[in-house]
Image (tube, helix red, strand yellow):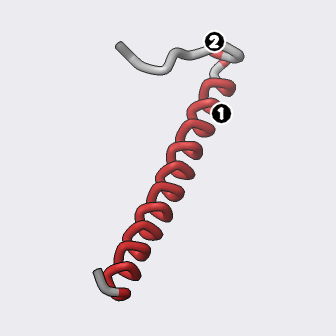
Amino acid sequence: MSDNDDIEVDSDADKRAHHNALERKRRDHIKDSFHSLRDSVPALQGEKVGEGCG
């Protein structure tokens, strides 16, 4: 393997890590939005919601 191959692998790993971080941030934002929505609906305030729908 040449040095150029190592750089490409690192670049791919960096891209993957960056994408994973962005995706985690996106999921956290969605989760926070659902919590905010749940807390704004009087019938659901403070109610714990399960992980999945079935």
Which quarter of the rendered picture does the N terminus lie within? bottom left
Left or right: 30 as drawn, with respect to 19: right
Helix, strand or loop for disc 2: helix
Above or below residue 44? Residue 1 is below
Seen as rendered, the residue at the extreme left is 1
Q: Which residue is mark 2?
A: 43
Above or below residue 7? Residue 18 is above
Q: Residue at x 69, y 17 (%)?
A: 45
Q: Which residue is mark 1?
A: 36
Seen as rendered, the residue at the extreme front is 1
The residue closer to the viewer here, 21 or 44, is 21
Q: Amino acid at mark 2?
A: Ala
The residue closer to the viewer here, 48 or 42, is 48
Left or right: 4 as drawn, with respect to 46: left
Give the mark toward the camera: 2 or 1.
1
Q: Earlier in the sequence, mark 2 or mark 1?
A: 1
The number of numbered badges drawn on the structure is 2
Residue 39 on image: x %, y %:
68, 25
Residue 5 on image: x %, y %:
31, 81
Residue neighbourhood size for the residue with mark 2, other residues' Cα within 10 Å, grouped as few (<14), some (14–19), many (≥20): few
